């Protein structure tokens, strides 16, 4: 339990230390959407019900902050872990995710978005969406 709490505090301190920088980069990029390089990726979804609660980077998905931080699994040969991944959904909404996880089936131009609800993840299915990567 204590190790879990220490990891939680370490993760929070890392997030808070970089939050302002990441937020300003995200806002700048969002305002310059026409200059953003978008690539098409296959996007799927997963939950902690399927694969546990700790990401490859040691982030605990079921902690309260996972409600406020969007996490995704990537192929680290394609997208560097820790990168911000902007996903442009079919309705035009752009949502930022942090690449903190990997998966045996996540290879190449494929991204798995973490969702807290199993039914939401199942209903999301497999989609071809545009993605922009900030390292």
Image: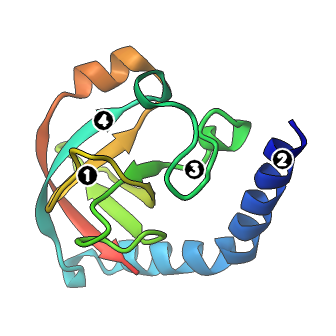
Q: Nearer the viewer, mark 3 or mark 4?
A: 4
From the image, which quarter does the C terminus lie in?
Answer: bottom left
Report if the CB atoms under discs 1 and 2 are less than 8 Å apart. Answer: no
Disc assigned to residue 69: 3
Q: Position of residue 23 (x, y in %)?
A: 57, 72
Total numbered labels placed on residues in the image: 4
Q: Earlier in the sequence, mark 2 or mark 3?
A: 2
Q: Nearer the viewer, mark 2 or mark 3?
A: 2
Residue occupying image coordinates x 43% and y 69%: 81
Q: Position of residue 120 (x, y in %)?
A: 35, 21
Report if the CB atoms under discs 1 and 3 are less than 8 Å apart. Answer: no
Question: In terms of secondary structure, where does tag 2 sit?
Answer: helix
Identify the residue under disc 2.
3
Question: In terms of secondary structure, where does tag 3 sit?
Answer: loop
Residue occupying image coordinates x 45% and y 81%: 28
CA separation in Å, label 1 and label 2: 29 Å
Residue occupying image coordinates x 48% and y 70%: 82
82 or 53, nearer to the observer: 53
Q: Earlier in the sequence, mark 1 or mark 2?
A: 2
Q: Position of residue 93 (x, y in %)?
A: 30, 50
Disc assigned to residue 45: 4
Q: Earlier in the sequence, mark 4 or mark 2?
A: 2
């Amino acid at each position: 339990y204590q190790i879990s709490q220490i990891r939680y505090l370490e993760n929070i301190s890392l997030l808070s230390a970089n939050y302002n920088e990441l937020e300003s980069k995200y806002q700048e990029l969002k305002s310059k959407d026409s200059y953003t390089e978008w690539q098409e990726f296959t996007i799927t979804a997963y939950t902690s019900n399927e694969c546990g609660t700790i990401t490859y980077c040691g982030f605990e998905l079921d902690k309260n902050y996972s409600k406020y931080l969007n996490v995704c699994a990537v192929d680290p040969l394609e997208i560097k872990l820790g990168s911000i991944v902007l996903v442009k959904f079919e309705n035009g909404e752009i949502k930022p995710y942090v690449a903190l996880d990997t998966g045996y089936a996540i290879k190449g131009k494929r991204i798995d978005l973490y969702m807290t609800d199993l039914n939401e993840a199942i209903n999301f299915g497999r989609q071809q969406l545009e993605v922009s990567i900030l390292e």
